[in-house]
Image: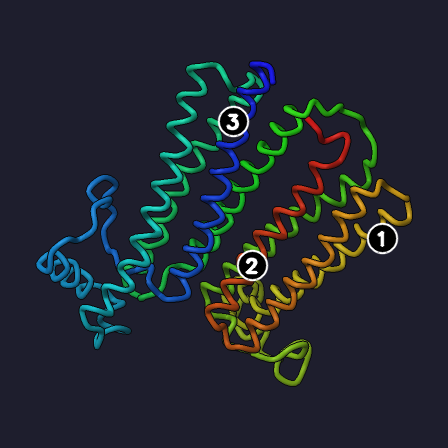
Amino acid sequence: MNNKDIKLEYIHKWLITCCFLIIVMVVIGGLTRLTNSGLSIVEWNIFSGIFPPLFNDDWIELFNKYKQFPEFRLVNKNINLNEFKFIFWMEYIHRIWGRLIFIIFLVPLIIFLKKKYIPRKFRKHFFVILFLILLQGTLGWYMVKSGLIDKPDVSHYRLSIHLIMAFIIYGYLLFITFSIYNLKKKKKKNKKNKNFFIINVILIFLILITVFSGGMVAGLDAGLVYNTFPLMGETFIPFDIWNLNPKFINFLENPVTVQFDHRILGIITFILTLVLWFYTRIHDLSSGIKKKTNILLLFVIIQISLGVATLLSYVAIPIALLHQLGALIFYTLSIWTLKSLPFMSK
């Protein structure tokens, strides 16, 4: 390899590492939410918060601080110190992992910029991602803060924004990762399959909308209101879907409507993936693209099955966690397919 290829190889491996760290972060975040651990740390100390409690007196002090907030008074008033330690460690790992992502992204970025390893056309993108990572940390605390005032629940709006921001940062990083890989492999730019490209882009945006909807479901505990499928109770469209006034607020705050929306978005995502799959057959695209759409179609079926299983199990933690991870994998596959197109090589 020449010197340029070696530089690109370093950047490529660094970006893969960052993507992997975010995947783990999404899993940790999901587990934190599902175990109701997110409100166990009631302060945001950027630097001193790195160090965990070491002695029993430290634990007692943190536990006493926790007792001053709504979650303890209204939900966990019978919790003991050992039970508090479990939810504390869940949230602590979540926060530390976020700091780790920031460091692993920032330090190599400074080094690569100083050594001029990063191609000029990519530099602005890395600064945007750095800003988004910092913003994500702030949004995380903004989300937690909403559950420390009156109600022991974080705002489902803030939760959904925090979740979708993680997907956006990951997708942005992944897109650049594939671009660096294609640059390293010296793939040619060749404009073809424009309609396929448009459908693929729409699919990616639809996945993001569905993920946002999933955050709303999680934030409102809407996965527990109707645990049947394909019917919601005894009908496809439940009668209490318009319970709130004004009517539009049902789409945002009625758990029944929010769950219904998520179901519909999942079905539309499946249909669009099927359209993408058929398009490759009708227009006889390359075997590589066909294989990728085969994988996409298979995985959207798996993801819908996981969603149904999550409902039927009354949001069992392992299944719900797999469903969230499945969304991230499906999102990854959709970007991988897009970046495999000839005209998306650079």
Residue type of the residue flagged with mark 3? Ile
Residue name at image x 71 percent, y 42 percent = 337
Return the x and y of residue 236 as percentages of the image width and height. 69, 77
Q: CA distance from mark 3 to mark 1?
A: 36 Å
Q: How crowded is the residue under tag 1: few (<14 C-alpha within 10 Å), some, or many (20+)?
A: some
Q: CA distance from mark 2 to mark 3?
A: 34 Å
Q: Which residue is mark 3?
A: 11
Q: Nearer the viewer, mark 1 or mark 2?
A: 1
In the picture, the quarter occupied by the C terminus is top right
Q: Quadrant of residue 155?
A: bottom left
Q: Which residue is mark 1?
A: 278
Residue type of the residue flagged with mark 1? Phe
Return the x and y of residue 140 as percentages of the image width and height. 37, 48
N-terminal-most mark, 1 or 2: 2
Q: Secondary structure at mark 3?
A: helix
Q: Which residue is mark 2?
A: 213
Residue name at image x 60 percent, y 18 percent = 1
Residue type of the residue flagged with mark 2? Ser
Q: How crowded is the residue under tag 3: few (<14 C-alpha within 10 Å), some, or many (20+)?
A: many
- 98 left or right of 262 in image: left
Residue name at image x 8 percent, y 58 percent = 57
